[in-house]
Image (tube, helix red, strand yellow):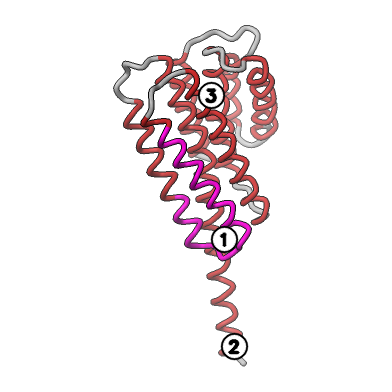
């Protein structure tokens, strides 16, 4: 009897570990989808800046790693079906990166980024998981992506609406969490305020990096 209980405990422990690994990889994939779109928009804004192509290529590799981790740690057929879709979407991002950097492809990148997020949200919903720090970092990166899209005049009305929504989500998440993070967020929040929305992309990059570091210290 003790042996059976021990085996069951090991099995449950392995299952919980696999679910945790899947959830973390899914949250990371969600963040990376926004980072890819954000960096692509920076590349569109400044095509001669050498650093963005390597960053985008690295993000694709990290997305591939997360997809492999999820595939390794799940036997759920619904999740595996979503993974096939996500893998196809990742390949489309790679094809767009190999193509010319232009407004039309930027719009496709944004569509594929949204598709990745939608698929990952379905995975996280099926796992009944949500990781606070990772989700908050995703929201911050999404904010930067929307900021760039608005200034590059890519569907500005819809993206302004989404930006407002993201600001409200971050406000709710940060409220009463940590005083230092709260102060840091409200120091930078006005940069993203749609009215007025000044275009200072490099300052926004610094703000995003500082916010991410503050989140990591939680």
Q: How many marks?
A: 3
Mark 2–mark 1 Cα distance, whole angstroms, equals 22 Å
Residue sticking out furthest to the bottom? 1
Who's the residue at 52% across and 33% down the image?
34
Question: In front here: 130 or 178?
Answer: 130
Secondary element at image label 2: helix
Q: Quadrant of residue 195?
A: top right
In the rendered structure, find residue 19 and report the number of the disc placed on it. 1
Q: Quadrant of residue 164?
A: top right
Q: Position of residue 42 (x, y in %)?
A: 43, 20
Query: What's drawn in magenta, residue-wise?
Result: 66-95
Who's the residue at 54% across and 34% down the image?
113
Q: Position of residue 17 (x, y in %)?
A: 53, 64
Question: In front here: 218 or 9?
Answer: 9
Query: Along the polypeptide, which appears first: circle 2 or circle 1?
Result: 2
Q: Quadrant of the N terminus?
A: bottom right
Query: Dot 2 corresponds to which residue?
Result: 4
Secondary structure that dominates the magenta span: helix
Query: Dot 3 corresponds to which residue?
Result: 107
- Vertical order, 29 against 184 (above or below): below
Query: Along the polypeptide, which appears first: circle 3 or circle 1?
Result: 1
Q: Position of residue 117 (x, y in %)?
A: 59, 39
Who's the residue at 66% across and 35% down the image?
173
Decide: few, some or many residues near mark 2? Use Cα within 10 Å; few <14, some 14-19, many ≥20.
few
Question: In front here: 117 or 5?
Answer: 117
Assess whether mark 1 and mark 2 are in contact (beta carbons under 8 angstroms): no
Query: Along the polypeptide, which appears first: circle 2 or circle 3?
Result: 2
Q: Is residue 78 left or right of residue 212?
A: right
Q: Position of residue 217 (x, y in %)?
A: 49, 39
Mark 3–mark 1 Cα distance, whole angstroms, equals 34 Å
Assess whether mark 3 and mark 2 are in contact (beta carbons under 8 angstroms): no
Decide: few, some or many residues near mark 3? Use Cα within 10 Å; few <14, some 14-19, many ≥20.
some
């Amino acid at each position: 009897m003790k042996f059976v209980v021990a085996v069951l405990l090991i099995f449950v422990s392995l299952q919980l570990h696999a679910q945790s690994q899947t959830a973390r990889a899914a949250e990371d994939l969600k963040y990376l989808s926004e980072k890819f779109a954000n960096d692509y928009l920076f590349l569109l804004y400044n095509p001669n800046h050498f650093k963005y192509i390597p960053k985008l290529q690295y993000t694709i590799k990290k997305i591939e790693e997360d997809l492999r981790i999820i595939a390794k740690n799940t036997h759920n057929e619904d999740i595996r079906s979503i993974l096939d879709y996500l893998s196809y979407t990742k390949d489309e991002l790679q094809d767009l990166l190999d193509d010319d950097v232009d407004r039309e492809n930027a719009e496709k990148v944004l569509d594929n980024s949204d598709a990745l997020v939608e698929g990952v949200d379905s995975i996280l919903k099926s796992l009944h998981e949500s990781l606070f720090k990772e989700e908050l970092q995703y929201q911050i990166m999404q904010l930067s992506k929307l900021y760039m899209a608005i200034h590059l005049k890519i569907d500005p009305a819809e993206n302004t609406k989404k930006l407002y929504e993201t600001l409200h989500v971050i406000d709710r998440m940060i409220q009463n969490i940590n005083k230092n993070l709260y102060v840091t967020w409200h120091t930078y929040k006005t940069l993203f305020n749609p009215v007025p929305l000044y275009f200072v992309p490099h300052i926004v990059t610094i703000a995003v990096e500082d916010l991410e570091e503050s989140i990591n210290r939680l």
